[in-house]
Amino acid sequence: MAELVAAFLFIGVVAYAVLGGADFGAGFWDLIAGGAKRGREPRHLIDVSLAPVWEANHTWLIYCLVVLWTAFPPAFAAITTTLYIPLILALLGIVLRGAGFAFRKATVRTEEQRLYGAAFALSSVLTPYCFGAIAGGLASGRVPTAGNGDAISSWVNPSSILGGILAVLACSYLAATYLTVEALHRDDQKLYRYFRDRAMAAGAVTGAVSIAGIFVLQADSPRLFDRLSGPALPLVVLAAVGGLVGLALLWARRTVGTRVAAAGAVALVIVGWGVAQTPYLLGTHLSITEAAAPNATLAVVVGVAVVAGLLIVPSLVLLFRLTSRGEVGVGDRPFRGGMTEGEGGSGEGMTEGDGSAAGEAGRSGAAQADRGAAVGLNKGTRSTGAKADRTAVPLDPATVRSRPHRWVPYALCAGAVTATAVAGARATRPDARWYRELNTPDWQPPPWAFGAVWTPLYASIAVAGGRALNAARGPQRKALAGEFAANLALNAGWSNLFFRLRSPLAGLAGTLLLDASNVRLLARVARTDRKAAVVLLPYAAWCAYATCLNASIVARNHEPRHRGPAKG
């Protein structure tokens, strides 16, 4: 149970690094964009890209802190009483960064805008550096189990400095990649070349620092070095390959897969660090089981984490999709329905959905004139001959009322998937004596891996279901909803067949039915929305793997009471 909770905790760390890290990296490029005239266009793209999502990404930081202090209180106490200086600096940086980003868009005077802009940019560098320094202090074993370690050397040391620099560079690489793709979507060749060159440079520098860091870790953190060059080496190699693929896609002007490759490279580096540090939470001591709270507490944490994942992940996916389609945003990608095609949008000095200040509208008009063309508002495309409008038109209430509630299918699917996950979890008993005595194959994953895999898979079902139901109409929607309901019923029924009946043979029959349902579901969803069907592919693949695992257990165990794998 403790390992499962640790896996959930690390999922949050990876998500915050990939999503929040890109926001911090955008602040780095804002910092070095140059003066007001030279840096106007890059800063404008940064503003309109960050505004809808920057606060939502910090959800993962809150999630990580709550899981850490609830599930592993000794580790939380040791970290906070030793690394309190970088923690305070990081939290202060987050507050100043948010305040600077919000206030510089609401102020009119140039001096105030520069002050708030500097706070936003400098804090965007300080915060990831502090988080990287904390990771270095943990990995090098400088946080004692009893806490109250050295407040300076715990984060001012070679490993921490390396971690801080790599964190800033990785965030910069992510942000430049995301902004390059955004510039391509906007068909802005100038900004595409601007951020592409910076993404290539950031990726090259990150790789060079990583190679140099090998010698730093060998001297300062020998255990981490040994593990990174041992069991975690495949992840490190895959991370390097992912980074190279991302750079190649950038150079080839590809939008599909570019952000995934960059995010995957950074995520694999962090996962490699986690594998290298296992089974210790503090680098070289205090194992996961030693720091874990009682099993009753861990069970509650698992339940809350599953429910939170099923609610938060689809919500974030929906937010990112709305932002990418231009239905929510600021500047030249306002709330859709607020303007008609051909009307220009103010970009500078606007808060989200607000553009009534005359001084700000004047500055946005100057910025648009400096670019030489206004930006069209239909699906985020550029309008070459339109003149920038000086004011933003508010949303038309009639238009809002006439639009369908596209979030309803997502909410219904999230509720159904949550009920399925809870029903399956209540029936699953991997710690039962009869189950522990089973003869299982060597390729069965450890128990904690199942929860770590099923959480994103359940979230993918909710996302794919909401998307497909939104695309379907009339009888097709009813048939699709019925197919999803039957599939989820079979999903929850497997645990009852296997664990409550203690019959691997019944479980095998149930998972075969689930596989058949997956084939039908994929075919029906693909006719409605191919992207939703692609999202469901990992779920179908994992169920097929579970079928093979279940069949292997049936073959290895002849007594009906001694058969079956954990839910997979």
Image (cartoon, rainbow, N blue to C red):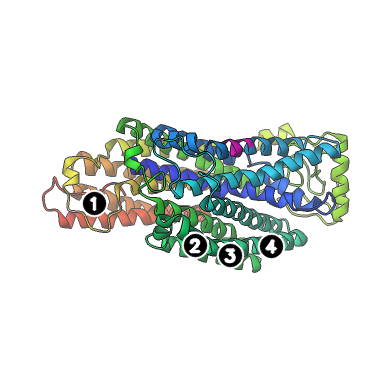
The region drawn magenta spans 88-92
Provide the secondary structure element on which disc 1 rests.
Answer: helix
Q: Earlier in the sequence, mark 1 or mark 3?
A: 3
Q: Earlier in the sequence, mark 1 or mark 2?
A: 2
Q: Which mark is residue 208?
A: 3
Vertical side of 540 occupied by 127: above or below: above
Q: Earlier in the sequence, mark 4 or mark 1?
A: 4
Return the x and y of residue 549 as percentages of the image width and height: 26, 55
Q: Residue at x 47, y 55 (%)?
A: 220
Q: CA distance from mark 1 to mark 3?
A: 50 Å
* Mark 1 vs mark 3: in front: 3
Q: Are marks 1 and 3 in contact (CB under 8 Å)?
A: no
Measure the alpha-carbon separation of dots 4 and 2: 28 Å
Q: Which residue is mark 2?
A: 214
Residue ID at (72%, 33%): 398
Residue 196 disc label: 4
Give the mark toward the camera: 3 or 2.
2
Q: Are marks 1 and 2 in contact (CB under 8 Å)?
A: no
Mark 4 or 2: in front is 2
> Which residue is drawn at the image coordinates 70% and 44% (left, top)?
122
Q: CA distance from mark 1 to mark 2?
A: 47 Å
Q: Which residue is mark 1?
A: 508
